[in-house]
Each structure stands twice: as C-alpha cells, then as structure tokens.
Amino acid sequence: MKNLKSILAPITFTLCMFLSACAQKTNSTEEKPTEIKLLTKTNKMTNPYYSRTSTEKLNVSDAEWKKVLPQDLYATAREGDTERAFTGKLWDSESKGTYYCAACGNKLFKSDQKFQSSCGWPSFFEQENKNSVVYKVDKSYGMVRTEALCGRCDAHLGHLFDDGPEPTGKRYCMNSVSLEFDPDSEK
C-alpha cells in the first residue's frame, strides 16, 4: 500500500498542476458561443479608452473601468478572473485576422502567431510587438507563474509559459474574453 501511495502522489500532483496551470479564479458559467462575436459598437462608443491607434499608456481606476466594460470582461481584465478551459469563443478558432485587447483596443497578436495547444484557451507563440504585452510575477495558488497583461491598460490577459513551439518556445495562454478578434477582410 505504501508503494502505491508513492506512485500515485506524483501523478495526482502533476494532474492537479496541469488542470490549474492557466486557471486563477473561475466564476464564469457561460456556455461557449456558437459564433465569434466582436465587441459591439455600443461598447466601444461607451468606452472612451478604446482605441486601435493610440499607444499611450492608460492610467484608469478600476472604478472607472467598471463603468465602461461589460461585466465578464471587467471580471477577467481587472479582477484576474479566468474563463473555464474550452469555453471561450476563440480557443479553437483558426480564422485569419488580428487580436486586440478587448478593454482598450491595443494590438496584441496576429493569427499567424496562434497555434493549437489543446489547453483550452487561445494560445500564441509570440506577441505582436515588444510593448503589446507586459509581465508580472503571479504567486497565486501556490505556484509561480508569469501573468500576461495588456501593455497599454494592464488588463489581465492570461499567463505566459515556456512550453510553446519554436521559434520562441513560449505559450501565451490567453482568455478569449480579454481578446477582440478582427478577421482579415476578403479581397
């Protein structure tokens, strides 16, 4: 029996770490949408901080963000919530286009930087530019991880791991709700 416990303990620990690798809080009970929805014009018009052209660093209080962001986006971007694996609208999308911060419009990733990681969240091997994503040490849940934040508004996007494909070996494990996808136009 002692031998069985010594075998099962590392397996159980590894399984728990795998299942919680990207997770922080999980308050969302939404079902996966059947189609990719872009942030509505109404949301953009009521959010004075949203811009796809400005690179100015924003310094906005959480109270102000709460007034202009939808509740699910606020919970993730400002409170560090994490959507459940395999439930976000973009985790398995193979559409071509550009990914922006859903809170402020900052350009984050292109679809040619995305890969299928099978972790249940949209995954990228490289950010759009060196300033589009910034990092912070995250010591929550007894782990040490690298939190990925929007370089313009500091919105929580997800986490960065060192298990991605070449050429970078990185996996930007992002929350779909924190991303706005704009498909390439057909020409």
Image: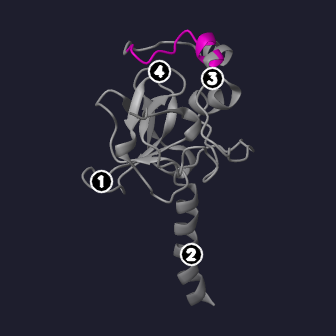
Which quarter of the rendered picture does the C terminus lie within?
A: top left
First in sequence: mark 3 vs mark 1: 3
The residues bearing labels 1 and 2 have C-alpha atoms spaced at a distance of 29 Å
Residue pointed to by mark 3: 40
**Circles 4, 3 touching at the beta carbon (< 8 Å):** no
SS at badge 1:
loop
Q: Residues within 10 Å of mark 4 (few under 14, many from 20)?
A: many
The answer to whether 139 is drawn above or below residue 79 in the figure is below
The answer to whether 86 is drawn above or below residue 159 in the figure is below
First in sequence: mark 4 vs mark 1: 4
Which labelled disc corresponds to residue 169? 1
Task: Tally the numbered discs.
Answer: 4
The answer to whether 77 is drawn above or below residue 60 in the figure is below
First in sequence: mark 4 vs mark 3: 3
- Which amino acid type is shown beneath numbered disc 4? Cys
* Mark 3 or 2, closer to the camera: 3
Q: Position of residue 121 (x, y in %)?
A: 53, 49
Residue pointed to by mark 2: 9
First in sequence: mark 3 vs mark 2: 2
**Circles 3, 1 touching at the beta carbon (< 8 Å):** no
- Which amino acid type is shown beneath numbered disc 1? Gly
Q: Is residue 82 shown left or right of residue 156?
A: right
Q: Residue at x 60, y 11 (%)?
A: 45
Q: Position of residue 30 (x, y in %)?
A: 73, 43
The residues bearing labels 4 and 1 have C-alpha atoms spaced at a distance of 26 Å
First in sequence: mark 1 vs mark 2: 2
Q: Residues within 10 Å of mark 3 (few under 14, many from 20)?
A: few
Q: Position of residue 138 (x, y in %)?
A: 48, 40
